[in-house]
Amino acid sequence: MPTLDPVVLFFLLGLAAGLARADLRLPGAGYEFLSMVLLLAIGLKGGVELARQSPAELLPQLGAVLLMGIVLPLAAYPVLRWRLARPDAASIAAHYGSVSVGTFAVAVAFLASNGVDHEAYIPVFVVLLEMPAIVVGILLARGMGRQTDWNRLGHEVFLGKGMVLMGGGLLIGWAAGPEGMRPLGGLFFDLFKGFLALFLLEMGLIAASQMASLRRHGAFLVVFGIVMPLLSALLGGWVGWLLGLSVGGTALLATLAASASYIAVPAAMRLAVPEANPTLSLAASLGVTFPFNVLVGIPIYLDLARLIHRLGA
Amino acid sequence: MSNEYRKLLTVITESAIERDLLADMERLGAHGYTVTDARGKGSRGVRDAGWGEAGNIRVEVLCDDATAQAIALHLRMRYYDNYAMILFMSEVQVLRPEKF
């Protein structure tokens, strides 16, 4: 039986404190710092491993993961369209096609505490999965019209915090190699769990504040926010198995597929599809899917990965 | 004390559009601006700046009347429909009118 990682308890503390309206508020700069360290740490760790991979092996994997990032929002859109206006459906679809680095970090910690190994270059997939859903979401909302300023948007997407720090971390890790990274390991790797715990405390507070708007926006988003990640995880797990990833790697890809963005996509959608209501997408992504994945989903995705590998073998 | 008056234009809106908004203001003739992080509550709910993406900003611009009107008109046309934004103007006394 997989155990609940202690960092998850920090998330629960934040959630409970937020719901009880406790007088707890992390300073904005603190949150910025924590997310910076996490993004860099994840990038660095992946970069170190990336140096050992052969490009011939990696390229088809990257292609398949990219394709998954396009398929997920396309699958979510018609379901959302059933109840929501076009811009809202497109925007939420983009959120669910993209990824949450916070969820990924919890999954990595969960695998480690359960002694499950995984391919350490998977952070490359995280970087890669951030973008395609944004483009698909905009096309779903706008069509191929000329209304979208792609230059401006490209700037927003490629030079957003996540891309710069995680991509930059990958490059630094790749260039420095394991030996070069050793002196920095104390901050980025040894303290990783501590930073993650504080980050999750804040995420609990944020999730609690989003849950308030859920009461207004109804059951559909709650059901979608739970069922969609489960189905996405099936696709992610299947792709992971096809690509020959280990059980841990498959579980991580399933988690990535299941997670929903709450940083890169909201910012891009606010600019590109301003008529979409950001409250809806954030309530679903932060108020439902993030807590669901952190508390319940990730252990399920590990079991799923094991099952897929057993069935496949 | 100088008797010169200028308009103080204050805009409170989502931090997501900061870059576009400031570019618009400069294009329409503002010589400078001051941006501060803000939080509060309005018709679009609580904006508590709990995390970077949910923050508000307060932009202040000192300029002549024509520029203030031009900026106000443009913001109303471009942003009012879809973004949380309020805008107000007041007349203020300035000491160095040539700056604004």
Image (spheres, coloured by chain):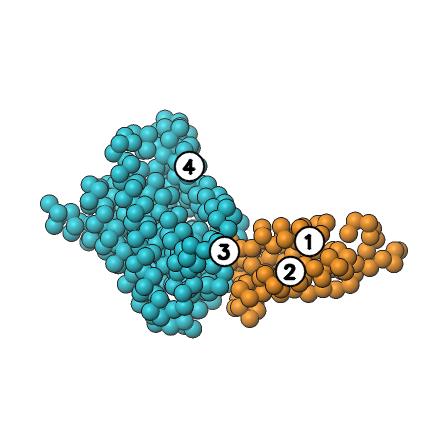
Chain colours: A cyan, B orange
Question: The residue under label 4 is which amino acid type?
Answer: Gly
* 2 vs 4, front mark: 2
Task: Find residue A284 and report its horizontal and vertical position in percent.
Answer: 38, 63
Query: SS at mark 2?
Result: helix
Quarter where residue A219 is shown: bottom left
Left-right relation of A212 to B40:
left
Q: Residue furthest top?
A: A179
- Please tell me the numbered disc located at residue A147: 3
Q: CA distance from mark 1 to mark 4?
A: 39 Å
Residue A162, x across and y down, in percent: 44, 45
The residue carrying mark 2 is B74
Q: Are marks 3 and 4 in contact (CB under 8 Å)?
A: no
Q: Which mark is residue A54?
A: none
Disc 1 marks which residue?
A: B28
Q: Are marks 1 and 4 on the same chain?
A: no
The amino acid type of the residue labelled 2 equals His
Q: Which residue is mark 4?
A: A169
Let me know if marks 1 and 3 both belong to one chain.
no
Residue drawn 28% across the image and 63% down it: A227
Q: CA distance from mark 1 to mark 2?
A: 9 Å
Instruction: Report, in whole angstroms, how far the alpha carbon at label 2 lies from the one at label 4.
Output: 41 Å
Viewer can see residue A294:
no
Q: Looking at the image, can residue A213 be seen?
A: yes
Count all numbered tags in the image, as a single digit: 4
**x then y, percent, for residue B64:** 77, 57
